[in-house]
Amino acid sequence: MFHYVYVLENKNKELYIGYTENLKRRLLEHNQGRNKSTKNGESWSIVYCEACLHANDAKRRERYLKTNQGSRLLKRRLRDYLFKP
């Protein structure tokens, strides 16, 4: 079983970083407003995802991507998507 670190984006270009074992179910929960960190009625889409074999690796990666340094890395990694003309 895989453990996923994911990045969501809404129509306002806001990003949300999370971790889950079931990516499809988790996206549905975000879009149904069942997560207090994401607003009700917002339409979220997955823009980035990483899969890990061990839960601790995925959780550690999620914490890293939420740091200043991790955020800069993510923006460099998604440069073509985030900064398209």
Image (cartoon, helix red, strand yellow):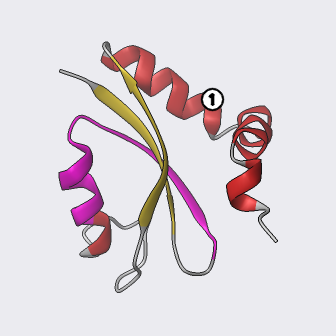
Considering depth in this image, is 77 or 55 the residue closer to the camera?
A: 77
Q: Name the residue at 79% across, 33% down.
A: 69
Tell me: 22 left or right of 4.
left
Viewer-nearest residue: 10 or 68: 10
Would residue 27 be counted in the magenta stretch? yes
Nearer-the-camera pick, 48 or 72: 48
Q: Is residue 69 left or right of residue 64?
A: right
Q: Position of residue 71 (x, y in %)?
A: 73, 42
Asked if residue 34 lies left or right of residue 8, the reply is left
| Quadrant location, the C terminus | bottom right
Going 23% across and 64% down the picture, which residue do you hit?
A: 29
Which quarter of the figure has residue 64? top right
Asked if residue 15 is among those painted magenta in the image, a careful observer would answer yes
Which quarter of the picture shows residue 42? bottom left
**In the rendered view, would you say 67 is above or below 29?**
above
Q: Does 41 sit above or below residue 78?
A: below
Q: Which residue is mark 1?
A: 64
Q: How many marks?
A: 1
